Amino acid sequence: MKSTDHNDSIERAETEEGGFAALIGLDWGSEEHALCLHDCTTGARESSTLEHIPEAIARWAAALERRFPERPIALCLEQAKGALISALMAYPFLVLYPVNPATAARYRQAFKTSRAKSDPSDAQVCLELLLQHREKLSPWRPNDPQTRALTRLLEHRRGTVDLRTLLTNMLRDALKSYYPQALALAGQDLFAPLACQFLLKWPSLQQLQKARKETVRKFYYAHNCRRLDVINKRLDALAAMIPLTSDQAVLAPAKVHVTMLTRQLLQLAVALKEYDARIAQLFARQADAFIWKSFPGAGPTLAPRLACAFGSEHSRYQSAAALQQYSGIAPVTERSGKNQHWVHRRWAQPHFVHQTFFEYAHQSVLHCAWAKLYVQEQMAKGKKHPTAVRALAFKWQRIMFVCWRDRVAYDEATYLHSLKRRGSPLAAKLALTLQKAA
């Protein structure tokens, strides 16, 4: 399905006289889904179940299209991504309204607090949200297939990096239990090919000390470690090293465990290269790629992530504030009574999107003078470093939104000139800082 087909259905439902032919609430399940359908013509309501297999979903969708051939159908469900929503996007006549599970749960509890079996099902709750509060819900406007594929690759890549971190920590703990010298001998990064190959070749200190010095030296050279001072220091220290334990009951299982972990880390390194190649290929085809490449410090990983965070559907965010709130970067102000109020970070957020803007802001400090100065100012006001970085991300989002909306690349000189023209204190402080540095 093209995303334009789905978006055309939304426009048709919003502009046509008849609106939707039917409204459906769907309660997602791993094996079957509960459905509650409201016929907008007759007012009749029906409940049913749908088995979670492709053939059953296809038959159900075909029956709906035959039954309501003239107008689109609205469907509300507690999902914004996943197998089911991907399947439903294949049918342009379905207009999807994904809601946060917390929204449905709190709506149910507002009217039924007992949580008993006789309370309305989640499918009924989703239907009620469509019937009573559709104007407050946003129909799902999917990105184009290329952007959706790029988003999935980036999320999978991040998951792979997290898995690598987990395995590296497990490897470090295993080495500490019987072979702590390897933490210095195998190099700084245990997930690097040098460290993994080193541990596969010499999984214990006893085996390493049996090797000739020249053999170890050639190993380092073959793996691009050619600093003579570093190599000689390691080789000189090797002869004086003493094993932490010689107990075979400890050594034998530990070597098997370390070998397993290093092989997995080597495989992950291959997978990450494949991800990077595919991500670069897809990102190069993005129409807006030039925008995200223009931001200082974005690089080959964060630039595609920024592109996916904004997406290809330009009607999704009507303002920078909408993006700031959705991503969880915008703070929340709570008030109680006349004089009490407090500000805190937003807890409900799409984690990967929030992480993208936070990590970009953190990285931009290394490449952008005004960003570095801004974070320093925030911390001088007493804010902690993560709060200062989120404040910078909030500022970057406003800049990015204008570039994305107008389809123009970021230009540092233009932005600084704009700050100076508006009389921004940040521009004056930056000019003073640069003057002192000169």
Image (spheres, rainbow, N blue to C red):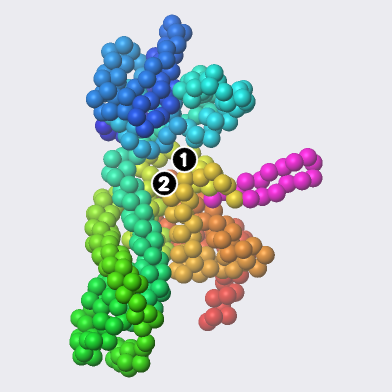
User: Mark 1 highlights which residue?
Assistant: 317
**Residue drawn at the location 60% of the way across and 27% of the way down:** 109
The residue lying toward the viewer, choosing from 319 and 23, is 23
Q: Position of residue 313 (x, y in %)?
A: 38, 39
Which disc number belongs to residue 222? none
Of all residues, the one furthest to the top in this rendering is 42
The amino acid type, in three-letter code, at marker 2 is: Phe
**Residue drawn at the location 41% of the way across and 32% of the way down:** 140
* Distance from the alpha carbon under mark 2 to that under mark 1: 8 Å
Q: Residues within 10 Å of mark 1 (few under 14, many from 20)?
A: some
Query: Which callout, 2 or 1, points at the residue further toward the start of the chain?
Result: 2
The residue lying toward the viewer, choosing from 270 and 202, is 202
Q: Is residue 83 above or below residue 262?
A: above
Q: Position of residue 10 (x, y in %)?
A: 39, 26
Element type where label 1 sits in the image: loop
Q: Position of residue 59 (x, y in %)?
A: 26, 20
Position of 414 with respect to 293 (left or right) is right
Q: Residues within 10 Å of mark 2 (few under 14, many from 20)?
A: some
Tag 2–tag 1 contact (CB < 8 Å): yes
Element type where label 2 sits in the image: helix
Question: Where are the magenta residues, as a range?
Answer: 329-344
The amino acid type, in three-letter code, at marker 1 is: Tyr
Position of 225 with respect to 308 (left or right) is left
**Residue drawn at the location 41% of the way across and 48% of the way down:** 309
User: Mark 2 highlights which residue?
Assistant: 310
Q: Is residue 327 above or below residue 30?
A: below
The residue lying toward the viewer, choosing from 288 and 50, is 50
> Does residue 86 show up?
yes
